Image (cartoon, rainbow, N blue to C red):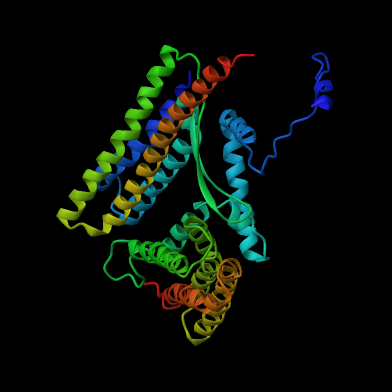
């Protein structure tokens, strides 16, 4: 082993280099700093995220922003406003023509949970809360339809108003279903897409039915 | 050190409970009470999760989705070297508020179920889930924080003992 005798490492050769730790989009250091941010920043950040999602629903492009940072504020606001508008004036009177407030609430949230469970059981890759988020935000066109229907009903409740309301509700129902399918069907294998789309179709159909058959007293 | 945060931590939870108990005095309308309590519960959930947790006890938890769509829950604890007396009082108020309110809502759940006032059941279930979610998240943070602190200190001692 004569050649190995010369192998020696001098002690005063400095070893230098660079160690870089690959960081993902949410590195721990970046998030530790949000532990100390002022409260106003937190509020504004969350409000902006909610606003961006509302815009995304109205113009459904295939973007993952709606899916990545889910939040349930939008669905809550939409659900409450829809349930309020379906209430029809005096809340506790026995003659109001719309379903009870709590029923609308339960239908929307329970329906969304069932659809989510269905898509997860079919092998979807989307997470539980992401799916709830998308389904909730896509109720926005139907809430707009409800608003329009109530305004039309203020003008009158004859055949013309019914036709106008029918057209508006059908258009918004189509918009809701297309928007939510654009986001949700991608996470499914291709031969299961119809199985996932059908409950979504049914869910928005039930809500549209409630909106269309609403008659104020 | 954070009197405003302590106040708000308790304010939303206690207002929700008081409104639920005395809603008949405030208003005749079921809808107004329902919406008010729901909004109070939601504000409470958001403020406890995002603000009072990190201000009063230095803990935070959230959900994160990666690029490949997998979701995981992150629990984060601030490493505090010294614990002042005022922060201990605040921490105690934080944990008491966090634990007692879900228990009260569970009591409401059973009372609503047995008195058959089922229209309130949806609200009570929402209240229980929101408050229990925060409780669970923060307990997980606390336990996770202690585990990671002990891991880090043991690693420090091990590397210190390696001979040169």
Question: Residue A52 occupies which quadrant of the picture?
Answer: bottom right
- Residue B41, position as x, y percentages in the image: 39, 44
- Residue A134, position as x, y percentages in the image: 54, 61
Above or below, A130 against B153 in this view is below
Above or below, B22 against A199 in this view is above
- Residue A159, position as x, y percentages in the image: 49, 87
Q: Nearer the viewer, residue A91 or A111?
A: A111
Q: Is residue A141 left or right of residue B32?
A: right
Q: Nearer the viewer, residue B20 or B145?
A: B145
Q: Is residue A85 left or right of residue A189?
A: left
Which residue is farthest front? A1
Quadrant location of the C terminus of chain B? top right
Residue at the spot 26% in from the left edge and 39% down from the top edge: B103
Q: Is residue B35 left or right of residue A31?
A: left
Evaluate whether residue B78 shows in this view.
yes
How many circles with numbers are drawn on the protein?
A: 0
Residue at the spot 46% in from the left edge and 80% down from the top edge: A157
Above or below, B54 against A76 in this view is above
Residue at the spot 62% in from the left edge and 30% down from the top edge: A33
Evaluate whether residue B22 shows in this view.
no
Above or below, A4 against A83 in this view is above
- Residue B101, position as x, y percentages in the image: 30, 37
Residue at the spot 59% in from the left edge and 66% down from the top edge: A183
Q: Nearer the viewer, residue A128 or B110?
A: A128
């Amino acid at each position: 082993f004569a050649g190995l005798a010369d192998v020696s490492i001098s002690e005063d050769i400095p070893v230098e280099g660079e160690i870089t730790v690959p960081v993902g989009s949410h590195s721990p250091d970046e998030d530790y700093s949000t532990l100390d941010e002022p409260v106003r920043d937190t509020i504004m950040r969350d409000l902006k995220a909610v606003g961006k999602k509302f815009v995304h629903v109205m113009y459904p492009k295939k973007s993952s922003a709606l899916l990545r940072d889910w939040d349930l504020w939008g669905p809550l606001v939409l659900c409450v406003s829809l349930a309020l508008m379906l209430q029809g004036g005096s809340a506790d009177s026995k003659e109001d023509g719309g379903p009870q407030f709590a029923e609308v609430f339960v239908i929307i949230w329970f329906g969304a949970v069932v659809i989510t469970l269905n898509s997860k059981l079919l092998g979807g890759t989307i997470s539980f809360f992401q799916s709830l988020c998308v389904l909730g935000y896509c109720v926005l066109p139907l809430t707009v339809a409800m608003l329009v229907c109530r305004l039309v009903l203020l003008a009158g409740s004859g055949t013309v108003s019914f036709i106008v309301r029918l057209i508006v509700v059908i258009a918004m129902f189509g918009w809701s279903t297309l928007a939510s399918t654009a986001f949700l069907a991608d996470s499914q294998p291709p031969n299961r897409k119809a199985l996932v789309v059908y409950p979504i179709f049914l869910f928005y159909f039930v809500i549209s039915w409630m909106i269309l058959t609403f008659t104020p007293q | 050190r954070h009197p405003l945060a302590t106040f708000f931590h308790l304010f939303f939870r206690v207002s929700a409970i008081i409104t639920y108990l005395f809603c008949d005095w405030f208003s005749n309308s079921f809808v107004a009470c329902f919406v008010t309590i729901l909004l109070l519960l939601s504000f409470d959930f958001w403020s406890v999760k995002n603000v009072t947790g990190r201000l009063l006890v230095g803990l935070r938890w959230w959900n994160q989705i990666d690029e490949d769509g997998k979701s995981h829950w992150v629990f984060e604890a601030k490493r505090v070297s010294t614990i002042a007396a005022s922060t201990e009082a605040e921490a105690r108020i934080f944990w008491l508020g966090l634990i007692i309110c879900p228990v009260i809502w569970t009591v409401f759940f059973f009372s609503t179920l047995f008195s058959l006032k089922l229209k309130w059941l949806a609200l009570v279930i929402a209240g229980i889930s929101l408050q229990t979610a925060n409780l669970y998240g923060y307990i997980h943070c606390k336990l996770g924080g202690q585990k990671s602190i002990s891991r880090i200190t043991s690693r420090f001692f091990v590397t210190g003992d390696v001979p040169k």
